Image: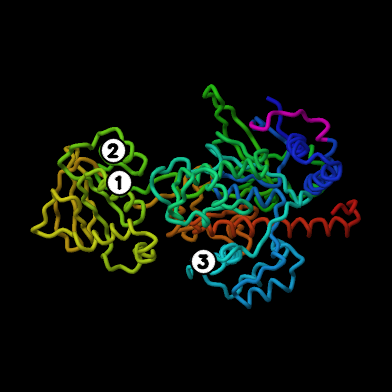
Amino acid sequence: MPVWCCRCALAGHFRNYSSPETEGQILNSLVQYFGDSFCRKVKAMPLVEETSLPEDSSLTLPVVVVGNGPSGICLSYMLSGYRPYLSSEAIHPNPILHSKLEEARHLSIIDQDLEYLSEGLEGRSSNPVAILLDTLLHPDADFGYDYPSVLHWKLEQHHYIPHLVLGKGPPGGAWHHMEGSMLTISFGNWMELPGLKFKDWVSAKRRNIKNDRVTPEEIACYYKHYVKVMGLQKNFRENAYITSISRLYRDQDDDDDDDDDQDDENISTGQLKMGKSAFIKRNWEIRGYQRIADGAHVPFCLFAENVALATGTLDSPTYLKVEGEDCPFVFHSMPEFGAAISKGKLQGKVDPVLIVGSGLTAADAVLCAYNNNIPVIHVFRKRVTDPSLIFKQLPKKLYPEYHKVYHMMCTQSYSVDSNLASAYTSFPEHHVLSFKTDMKCVLQSVSGLKKIFKLSAAVVLIGSHPNLSFLKEQGYDLGHNSNQPITCKGNPVEIDPYTYECTKEANLFALGPLVGDNFVRFLKGGALGIVRCLVTRQKRKQHLIVERGGGDGVA
C-alpha cells in the first residue's frame, strides 16, 4: 500500500490554492516542521488518494487529531490557518476586555496572551480560554443578548500546520447518531463553528425557522457541510478506528538533529526498566485500521509530534452495575429506546417503561414515551428541589418541554395511593437494586423501603464516558482522579488551562467534553488554546535554529 505523505497533503492544498505565491507559503510552513529533508522526501514518495491512510509511514506529522466531531473540526479549522482578529468597528460590551483587545488590535487572538485576555471573565465553563472565545463570539449571551461577534476570521495559508483528523464516521461525530426529532438544548447559533453562520446555512435548507433550537440531524448535516465548504476535507480520514497510541523513545545520546530518514525505535519495556533515564520520549505512534468499502480492515500506522484527543464522551454509556442489567429489555441509549418504539415493540403495552436518570437525555426519553402513550416510571436519586438539577438552569420560555417534565417530576411523585396505570409517576430519591429476567425490577427508597414493579422495558440514562482503550491505563492516569474513568463532569482530563496540554503527558492535548466543555459554544476555546501553544513552541524552535546558525531563517 502506498505511503501517505506530505506530498499528498501538498497536492491537496495546491488543488485549492493554485497561485505560485500560495504554493511557496505552504511549502515554507511544511519545511518549518519537517526540516531540510522535507523536499527530498516529497519527491521520493508516491501520491495516494486523500481518503486512505498509510499502512506504515516513517514520516512524522506535527499533529494527529483523534475524533471528528465539532471539537476536531474546529481544531482543524484553526490548524489550517484560519485566524481570529478583532473586527474593525467592533466594540465589546465588556469595557475592560475591549480595552485589552484594542492594545493589540493588529494581532490575531492566537498571537496574544490568552491568560491576560481571559483574566476576570466569568461564564458557564471551568476553562478560562473557553469563556474568552465564547464571549468574543457571543458577547453577553448568558444575559439573553444576541450581540454580533466582535471577531472576523482570516485564512492565512502560510500558518497551515500539517495534520490529520481521524474519525469513525463522517465529520460531525456523535451528532450523526443522535435522535433526529429531538430539539438540541442549545440555540442554533451556539452550535455553529467559526466562519459559517448556522442561520445562513439552515435558512437555505428549510423555509420556515419557527424555533431558534434545531434538531441533531440538522446539526450533523451542518458540520459535514462545514468541513467541505471550509476546504478541510484533505485533513479528514473517515472510517478510522484507533487501536493504540503509544510513546516512542530514543537514546539521549542520539543527535537531536539526526536526519528524519532514520526510523524511530520503540524501545522494549525491558530496556526501559533497566535504565529509563537513558531514554527520552520522542513522538507518538498511532496504530489502527480503516474500514474500506468491502468491509475489510486495512491497518495503518502514523507518527506524530503531538496528539489531540477530541473524542467526546458519548462512546460508552454508564451502567448502574446492578444484577440483571444485561437483560435484553434494559436499554442504555436513546437510539435503542427510539428504535424499540418505532418498531412497535412497546405499542399497546400495559406495563410501564422504567426510565432512570435526572438529566436532559432521561427527560427526552420521558417525552418520547409520553408522546407515544407509553406509561412511565421515572426513577432518580436526587430530590426534586436539588439545586444541581439541570432544569433549574433552563429558562421556562425557551425550554417548555423540559419544564413540563420537571413539573411532572415534582407533582406526580409516587405515594401509597398512586395509580401506576397513569401516564407518568416519578420516584425521587430512589435507585434500582436489580432487574429480574421476568421483566420485573426492584427499587429502593432513600429510607430503605423496597418496591417491585413489572415493566415493559427499562432505559438507563445516567451519563456516558469516552472509550480511551487505545491509551495506556485506558486514559485513567490523565484525569484529576487517576483511579476513575474519564467523565465530562466528575473526572475530566486534567489540562493546563491555557494550552489544553495534559498536565500528566507532554505533547498530548485534549478538548471538548473530555475537559468538561460539553457545550459546543465552549469547545472552540480548546482549539484556540492548542493552536496558540503549537505556534508559540514553533516560534521558539525557529528562534533557536537561527541562533545556532543551523537554519536558513525561514519564517
From the top left corner, tell me how far across and down residue 490 is, in percent. Answer: 42, 59
Between 270 and 327, the one lying in front of the other is 327
Counting residues from the start of the chain, the first of labels 3 and 2 encountered is 3
Q: Which residues are magenta?
A: 41-51
Which residue sits at x=39%, y=66%? 393
Most extreme residue toward the front is: 207
From the top left corner, tell me how far across and down residue 15 is, in percent. Answer: 76, 36
Q: Is residue 259 above or below residue 159?
A: above
Between 443 and 89, the one lying in front of the other is 89
Residue with the mark numbered 2: 341
Q: Is residue 167 above or below residue 404?
A: above
Q: Is residue 138 left or right of residue 213?
A: right
Does 212 appear in magenta?
Answer: no
Q: Is residue 243 visible?
A: no
Q: Dot 3, crowdedness within 10 Å: few (<14), some or many (≥20)?
A: some
Residue with the mark numbered 1: 368
Which residue sits at x=22%, y=58%? 430
Find out whether the residues at labels 2 and 1 contact each other: C-beta distance under 8 Å.
Answer: yes
State how many labels appear. Answer: 3
Q: Dot 2, crowdedness within 10 Å: few (<14), some or many (≥20)?
A: some
Q: How is the image coloured?
A: rainbow
Counting residues from the start of the chain, the first of labels 2 and 1 encountered is 2
Magenta segment main secondary structure: loop
Secondary structure at badge 2 equals helix
Check disc 1 and give the amino acid type: Cys
Q: What whole-number distance in Å separates the C-alpha atoms at marks 2 and 1? A: 9 Å
| Mark sitting on residue 141 | 3
Secondary structure at badge 3 equals helix
Q: Is residue 306 left or right of residue 384?
A: right
Does 42 appear in magenta?
Answer: yes
Q: Dot 1, crowdedness within 10 Å: few (<14), some or many (≥20)?
A: some
